[in-house]
Image (spheres, helix red, strand yellow):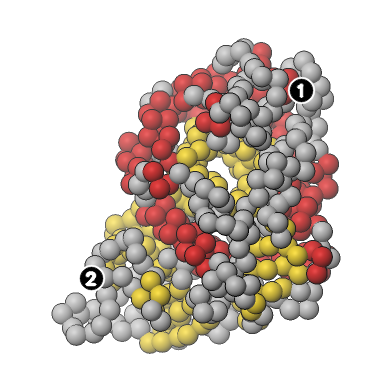
Amino acid sequence: MLPFSILCTFLGFFSVYASALSPPKYSTCISKDFGHGGTVCVCSEHDCDSFGEGSPLPTEEYAVYTSSKAGDRFNLKTAKLNKTLDLKSTQTGAQLVVNRSVTFQNILGFGGAFTDAATINIHNISATLRQKLLSSYFSEDGIEYAIGRIPMASCDFSTRPYSYNDHVGDLEMANFSLAEEDLNFKIPLMLTAMKTSKRNITFFGSPWSAPAWMKTNDKMTGFGQLKGKAGDKYHKAWALYFAKFIEAYTEKGVNIWAVTVQNEPSDGFLPFFSFQCMGYTAEMERDFIKEDLGPVLSARGHADVKIIMLDDQRPFLSSWADTILSDPVAAKYVAGIGVHWYWDTYIPATVLTDVHNRFPDHFILATEACADPQTSKPPRVSLGDWSRGNQYSHSIIEDLSNWSTGWVDWNLALNMQGGPNWVKNFVDSPIIVDAENGLFYKQPMFYHLGHFSKFVPPGSQRIEVIASEESSFSSSGSLLLDLLPRRLLLYSTQMTRKLH
C-alpha cells in the first residue's frame, strides 16, 4: 500500500504524475535539428506544440511524461501502479521508499525575467505569435511559469543604459518616472501573462545600479558604490527609489511581491566591469537594509513587500548570511536570500542547506541562471543543445535538494544572436526568437525547466524519498539521475489524490 499523494520530477527528463490528468490536450512538436546535439521545436503563427490537462486517470494508474535528446517532448504514457513495495524482489531498477512525515521547504515556483531584451524580442513578432509564446510559458497548455523577475531600470540586456531618475541632485525623487521600456514593452507583456495564466504570477524587482549621479564613480558601470554611508541622504533617497518603483508598477496593475537589494553586489568592486552594477560589502548591505530600505518601505506602506538579500553567487552565501542575518534589526526586514548559479562549480550546493540550518526562517531562492561563456562552450546561442538543458535540470535538482524554494531563469526570450545587449554580453535562452522569419524556437532548456514548473506548482512541499539502490536511473541509455544517489525529490501537492 502507498498511502500518500505525490508529484515527482526527475532531473527534468521525465515526470511521473501520480493520479495525473490524462490524456492531455496536445499539439505535436515540429522538430528541427541545427546540428548542436539535439533539436528545437519550431513555433509559427499556425503551429506550436502545447499540452494541457485532460480527464483524471483511473485509480491506481500513473502517467509518465518524457522529454529526451532523441526528440520526445512531454510524451505521455500511462501504466498501473504496483501497490506492493518489496525491496527484496528481483525487479530491476531502483525502488523508492517515500516518507510523507519528513517534510522540507514549500515551493514558491519557477520562472524567468522580463528584461528589456526579452520583451523587445517578444514585441518584434506578430500578435498571434506573441500570444503563442506567452501561452507556452504561462498558460495551462504551456509550462505554467509562476515567477517573473523585473530589472529595475536598465541592465546589460537593454539597448541603452538608463535609470528612473537621471535628474542630478533630486534626492526627493520628484522626477522619478518609469521608462519607455517599462511602459511599452515590459508591463504590457506582464499584464498579458497574468491574463494568460491561471496561476498567480509572483513578481520581484532587482536593481543593477543607482543613477550615475548617486554613485562614487558617477557612472552606472565599473568600480562604484552608493555615495556616503547608510542612514545618509543618498541612502535614504535610494531606498525611496525602491518605494517609487513598487508604487509605479502597482499603479500599472503589476503587484511587486519582493525586491532584491542589489543584483550581484560583488560586481561593483570590479574595476572594469562593463555594464550596470553597484558594489556592496555584506556590512554595507546589512546597514542599508536596517537603516534605510526596511524603514522606508515600511513608512511608505510596503512592509508586505519582501526584501531579498545577496542576489549573487553561491560562494558569498555563507558569510553574507552570517553578517546580515545575525543582526536582529536587519534580519527583521529580510525575508529571503537570492543566489545565482554562475559560480556553482566552486562550492557545493550543501552550502544552501548549511545556511538554511542556521537561519531557517529565511527562504532561499535561485534568482538567476543562463547558459553563457562562464557555464557553456560556444556558440552563445546553441539551437537544440541538449547538454544545456541537462545543466538546467542538474542545477534545479541540486538547489531544490538543498532548500531552495524555486528557480528563476534569466531572459524569457532572446534573438538569434543572444541579445539585444548594449555591451554585447550575448547568452542563450530557453526560447529564441527568429523575428525575420516569423518564428520562435523552444530550446531543450525550455522543456527541462517545464518538467519542474509544470508539475511542481507553487505550494508544493518537498517530502522525503529514498532510493533502494545507489545506481542511476536510465532510460534509452540516457543518464537521468547522476547527483542524488539514494535520495530523490518528491512533492506533496494539493493537485493529487491519494493512491489506494
Residue toward you, 484 or 344? 344
Residue 41 x %, y %: 64, 74
Q: In the picture provided, is 103 more to the left or to the right than 459?
A: left
In the image, which disc is placed on residue 173?
1
Q: In the picture provided, is 34 more to the left or to the right than 326?
A: right
The answer to whether one can see residue 112 in this image is no
Residue 451 x %, y %: 51, 67
Q: In the picture provided, is 303 more to the left or to the right than 123?
A: left
Please determine whether, in this image, residue 191 is positioned above or below residue 158: below
In the image, which disc is placed on residue 112?
none
Please determine whether, in this image, residue 178 is positioned above or below residue 29: above
Residue toward you, 156 or 325? 156
Q: Secondary structure at mark 2?
A: loop
Amino acid type shown at disc 1: Met
Amino acid type shown at disc 2: Glu
Residue 135 x %, y %: 69, 66
* Count of numbered circles on the image: 2
Q: In the picture provided, is 481 more to the left or to the right than 449?
A: left
Q: Residue at x 66, y 23 (%)?
A: 238
Q: Residue at x 78, y 78 (%)?
A: 46
Name the quadrant containing residue 478.
Answer: bottom left
Provide the residue designation for mark 2: 469
Per the model, the C-alpha gap separating discs 2 and 1 is 61 Å
**Quadrant (top left, top right, bottom left, bottom right) of the N terminus:** bottom left
Q: Which is closer to the viewer, label 2 or label 1? A: 2
